[in-house]
Amino acid sequence: MEHTPLYKAVRHGDTIQVRRLLSEGADPNEAWGGIDTILSVAATLGHTPIIRLLLEAGAKPTSYAVQAAAFGNHIKAVRLLTAAGAPVDAGGGHSPLLNVLHWSGLSREQQERLRHVLREAGRRELPAWYLRWRWQLRYGWQWRIRRWLYSMKQP
């Protein structure tokens, strides 16, 4: 797939080029592959000035962009996206971002700073017992059936 000039400018962190392309009519909501957008690329790299430009140009903040910024430990980008009204939690039965942070590879101190920012934005964290219970309801029966079928094959 050929990337657009706006994608290349965002990827390289060229704020002036991004401003020029947006003024010429480039689409700030450009997406490919489903959830990946120009805004999520800027959030992944932590380019806060570019995120601000994209939001001013009408980019729609998504939960994926917030998660990308959080996993990259870009606290300013997380603050900017949540202030713009981005949903932090993906919804649809997915675990809240506060619960997923321990898989991000960040140190405990970095996680605590991010947790503080997300809690300020009014986000919730589900108890671990609830997540285990929900997983058992959703997937536990499949594992039990597989184990039972496997035991039936044994001579």
Image (tube, rainbow, N blue to C red):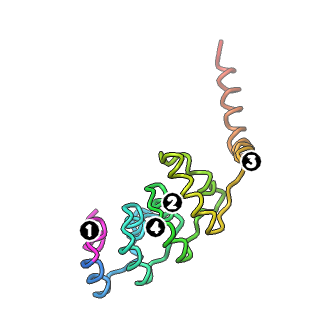
Q: What residue did someone put label 4 on?
A: 76
Q: Which residues are magenta?
A: 1-15
Along the polypeptide, which appears first: circle 4 or circle 3?
4
Q: Nearer the viewer, mark 4 or mark 3?
A: 4
Q: Is residue 131 above or below residue 21?
A: above
- Which is nearer the N-term, disc 2 or disc 3? 2
- Which residue type does callout 4 highlight? Lys
Say few, some or many: other residues with alpha carbon within 10 Å of mark 3 (under 14 / 14 to 19 / 20 or more). Answer: few
Taking the image as shown, residue 28 lies to the left or right of residue 17, namely: right
Q: What amino acid type is highlighted by mark number 1?
A: Lys
Q: Which residue is mark 3?
A: 130
**Residue drawn at x 40%, y 61% as measured from the top left:** 44
Q: Which mark is nearer the camera, 4 or 2? A: 4
Q: Which mark is residue 8?
A: 1
**Residue 16 sits above or below residue 10 on the image:** below
The amino acid pointed to by label 2 is Gln
Is 2 placed left or right of 82 in the picture?
left
Choose top left, top right, bottom left or bottom right for residue 91: bottom right
- The residue singled out by tag 2 in the image is 67
List x then y, in percent, for residue 96. 63, 57
- Residue type pointed to by label 3: Tyr
Q: Quadrant of the N terminus?
A: bottom left
Q: CA distance from mark 4 to mark 1?
A: 22 Å
Q: Are marks 1 and 2 in contact (CB under 8 Å)?
A: no
